[in-house]
Image (cartoon, helix red, strand yellow):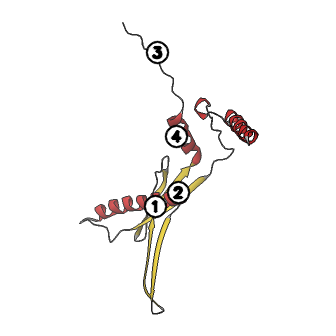
Amino acid sequence: MKSFIFAAFTASLLLTGCASNDKYVQWETEAPEQFPKLTAIGYAPLDTQPGNEQSQKVLMAMQASKIAAYRELAEQVYGQQIDANSQVNEWLLSSDTISANVSGMIKGAKVVKSYPAGDMYVTELELDFAQVWNLYQQQNRPRKIKDVTYF
């Protein structure tokens, strides 16, 4: 029995001795060979926008279509959470609810086109992941600590 406990103790020491200590290891992220480009299109109706003047309605539709395009980009990058609930009573569907939620931050997207099309306003966005990579690298690059001398 003592030899079994000694063997288990020795094995645990060997295993913990082989474990890496990540706080002393610096990881470097490598860039992929290709970066994808995502596109998204947002639409907004012109006539139903709030405002007294047509120019106000156009400005509101421009903003609404841009937000809709950003939402579509966020769906592509982060996915969409769907919650659904159905209730059946006496073998008949009594209620059915579905909700969708998108959450995320999009950096580096640019407006490709923004234009009226009939009774809608359209905004086309592009998200180039090469630009996202550059923003990420710039934000997360290692910083040197400067030596401060006091006089």
Q: Badge 4: how crowded within 10 Å, few (<14), some, or many (20+)?
A: few
> Mark 2 = which residue?
78
**Placement of the N terminus among the 4 image quadrants:** top right
Residue type at mark 3 is Asp
- Residue positioned 57% across, 49% down in the render: 128
Asked if marks 3 and 1 touch (Cβ < 8 Å), the reply is: no
Most distant residue in the front direction: 1
Location of residue 118 (image quadrant): bottom left
Asked if marks 1 and 2 touch (Cβ < 8 Å), the reply is: yes
Q: Is residue 13 above or below residue 101?
A: above
> Mark 1 = which residue?
102
**Placement of the C terminus among the 4 image quadrants:** top left
Asked if marks 2 and 3 touch (Cβ < 8 Å), the reply is: no
In the image, which is nearer the foreground, mark 4 or mark 3? 3
Element assignment for label 3? loop
- Residue positioned 51% across, 57% down in the render: 73
- For the residue pair 85 and 132, the one nearer the viewer reads as 85
Residue type at mark 2 is Tyr
Q: Which badge, 3 or 1, comes first in the chain's sequence? A: 1
